Image (cartoon, rainbow, N blue to C red):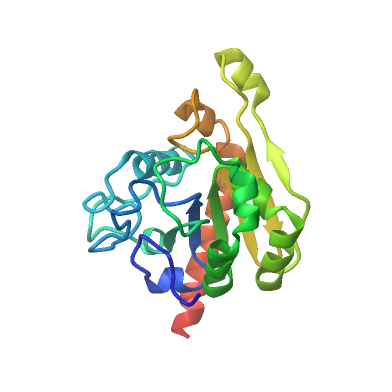
Amino acid sequence: MGTLNIATKLFPEGEKGGLLICGVNWGGDPSEPSTAENPSFFSDKRVNDYRYRNRLVKWFALLGHPLEEKDGMETSFERSIVQTNWLYGQAKDMRDKDIVAECIAHPDCFLYHIETLRPSLVMLVGLGLFKALNASTCRERAERSLGPASEPVVLRKTEFARVNGLIAFGVGTLRFERCMVVAVPHPTGTIGLTDQYIEAFKPELGPLLTDFKNGLTTRRADARG
């Protein structure tokens, strides 16, 4: 395989122990290359200004960890984020396909990034990816790089959803020995999902991002010797 399938610039903070954001596949027409001509950090609005990215950036703020969007103002946190997708392919949508089955059948792209980058935190975009990761073949291979995993947990704010008339979308968490995985709903492919619903998970997800940022500071200090 040998080539990273990423849309962001790979900074030292993301080369090992960073935050890997993983969607299903690159959208758009397969005849149009998806790789940015001038890659930058994930939240740089100059080069990454589209609905999927913008809503994810907003969610970071709702969870208590806003991302800098202006070039030159980024911190180690912004530079630690690497954006990829589970599948190498490119398609306008996956509505006619079983996403879980597709991802279980084709795990190599995602697992190559896990094996190469050894992220400390992975954000899967879509609960289907979380289900695929927890399939025995995918999970066992991930454990070779990340260490043993705990039992997966899926959280739903059923009371919040009932009050606001929303579907109780799932948020997944899975702890490997050397990596935390969270799965959030798809920001553009989930009908009825509100920012307020994501914000309701701040007590659970906010501390995980805090732990990652604290660990990032420690890792950078260790790297400097």
Within the image, what quadrant is residue 212 found in? bottom right
Which residue: 65% across, 43% down?
172
Please state if 178 lies on the left or on the right of 88 as rendered. Answer: right
Q: How many marks?
A: 0
Compared with residue 50, is residue 76 higher up or lower down, i.e. above or below?
Answer: below
Please state if 180 lies on the left or on the right of 216 as rendered. Answer: right
Residues 83 and 96: in front is: 96
Compared with residue 104, is residue 189 higher up or lower down, i.e. above or below?
Answer: above
State the image coordinates of residue 63 (x, y, percent, origin top left). 49, 40
State the image coordinates of residue 84 (x, y, percent, origin top left). 45, 58
Which residue: 36% across, 60% down?
7
State the image coordinates of residue 83 (x, y, percent, origin top left). 42, 57
Which residue: 50% across, 73% down?
16
Compared with residue 200, is residue 79 higher up or lower down, i.e. above or below?
Answer: below
Residues 145 and 106: in front is: 106
Please state if 89 lies on the left or on the right of 170 as rendered. Answer: left
Please state if 77 lies on the left or on the right of 199 as rendered. Answer: left
State the image coordinates of residue 211 (x, y, percent, origin top left). 57, 57
Which residue: 35% across, 52% down?
30
